[in-house]
Amino acid sequence: MILQSSVEEVISEIEKSGNRKFKFRQEVSSLLTISQEQNMSGVFDDILFFSKFLSHAYAVLNREGTTSETTRPLQQEFKTTLEKLHTLLRTLIKEADGLLKQDFVSRFLNMKPECMENLLALANELTWVKNYQLDTPNKATQKK
């Protein structure tokens, strides 16, 4: 769990450490803020874990294809994990204000191709947060 005083500061540190900019900076910030305000760090940590799996599985499936016997189990696990991520994100944003929740659902959680693309891109960016937590455990878990 990230317990620093400023979510924006954390996001900036993650961008700096990864030498890249978030496309979904506001959404990542919102998820982090909600997890802190609602005491749902465990849900947020699960979101990060499943996001990292999805990002890596997606890369493998794109590289190897989905018709191979060797990738079929991964394809099924990808589908199952995607459903888990949907559920966790809905759980986290359930208590968010109506506009934020509506925007998040319409951009990431509907069953439209562009929502799936956005969700996978968001999952990739959440992987940066997970990597930051793993690479900087003292900074990422202690208050300043």
Image (cartoon, rainbow, N blue to C red):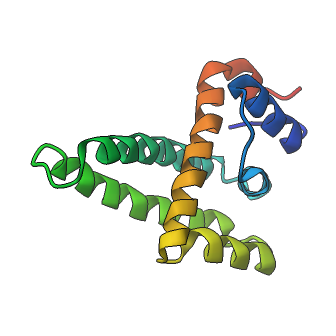
Q: Position of residue 80 (x, y in %)?
A: 32, 59
From this view, report whether residue 13 is shown above or below residue 21.
above
Q: Position of residue 121 (x, y in %)?
A: 57, 52
Q: Residue furthest left?
A: 69
From this view, report whether residue 83 is shown above or below residue 136.
below
Q: Position of residue 99 (x, y in %)?
A: 79, 78
For residue 65, side relative to residue 48 (left or right): left
47 or 1, nearer to the observer: 47
12 or 87, nearer to the observer: 12
**Residue at the spot x=76%, y=22% of the render?**
139
For residue 128, side relative to residue 66 (left or right): right
From this view, report whether residue 51 is shown above or below residue 142.
below
For residue 8, side relative to residue 24 (left or right): right
**Residue at the spot x=22%, y=54% of the render?**
66
**The C terminus lies in quadrant:** top right
Instruction: Indicate the quadrant where residue 6 lies.
Output: top right
| Count of marks overlaid on the render | 0
- Residue 124 in sight: yes
Instruction: Indicate the quadrant where residue 89 lies.
Output: bottom right
**The N terminus lies in quadrant:** top right
**Residue at the spot x=53%, y=77% of the render?**
110
From this view, report whether residue 13 is shown above or below residue 100.
above
Q: Position of residue 30 (x, y in %)?
A: 77, 57
**Residue at the spot x=42%, y=48% of the render?**
54
